Image (cartoon, rainbow, N blue to C red):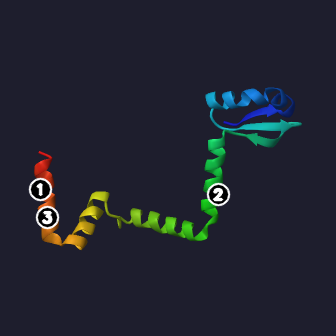
Amino acid sequence: MRKDIPISEARHELTSLPERLTKEPGAIAVTRRGKPVLAVMPWDLYQSLAETLEIMGDEDLMAALRKSIKEVEEGKVLLWKQSRIAASEKRFGTELTALLKSRRNKANL
């Protein structure tokens, strides 16, 4: 829910706004004649919004994100453990990977 304060009130409360935003997270709309003219928000929220806009503006990154989401929806992903095993098998071979896995399992008992 948006919190509005008139610009005259914001002028007097400027030094207390950081504490107010800590207690009530979000943004405050500063209004002039009832219409929003400024947004006051915590720096972390501003940075998050700026980074999100930067990501969304990168066509290549958004295409990769859409592709990744589609792959997840289609079940075309490996769990972290599965990918570690596949990488190990590629690097060391199936037999050595199985041996290492069995030793790791015995050590965890």
Label whose residue precedes the other's in the sequence (3 or 1): 3
Marks 3 and 1, Cα distance to the nearest angstrom? 9 Å
Residue drawn at 83 percent across, 26 percent down: 12
Above-or-below relation of 71 to 14: below
In the image, 2 versus 15, the foreground residue is 15
Image position of 18 (left or right of 7): left
In percent of the image, x 64 and y 60: which residue is there?
54
Q: Amino acid at mark 3?
A: Ala
User: Residue at left 60%, top 69%?
Assistant: 59
Determine whether the residue tagged by mark 3 lies in a helix, strand or loop: helix
Closer to us: 47 or 73: 47
- Determine which of the numbered discs, if any, sits on residue 53 in the image: 2
Q: Secondary structure at mark 1?
A: helix
Discs 3/1, front: 1
Q: Which residue is mark 3?
A: 98
The type of residue carrying mark 2 is Leu
The image's mark for residue 69 is none
Q: Which image quadrant is residue 101 in?
A: bottom left
Cα distance in 3D space between marks 1 and 2: 48 Å
Q: Which sits earlier in the primary sequence, circle 3 or circle 2? A: 2
Residue 56, position as x, y percentages in the image: 61, 61
Q: Which residue is mark 1?
A: 103
Q: Are marks 3 and 2 in contact (CB under 8 Å)?
A: no
Left or right position of 72 against 81: right
| Residue 75 image offset from top left, x and y in percent | 35, 64
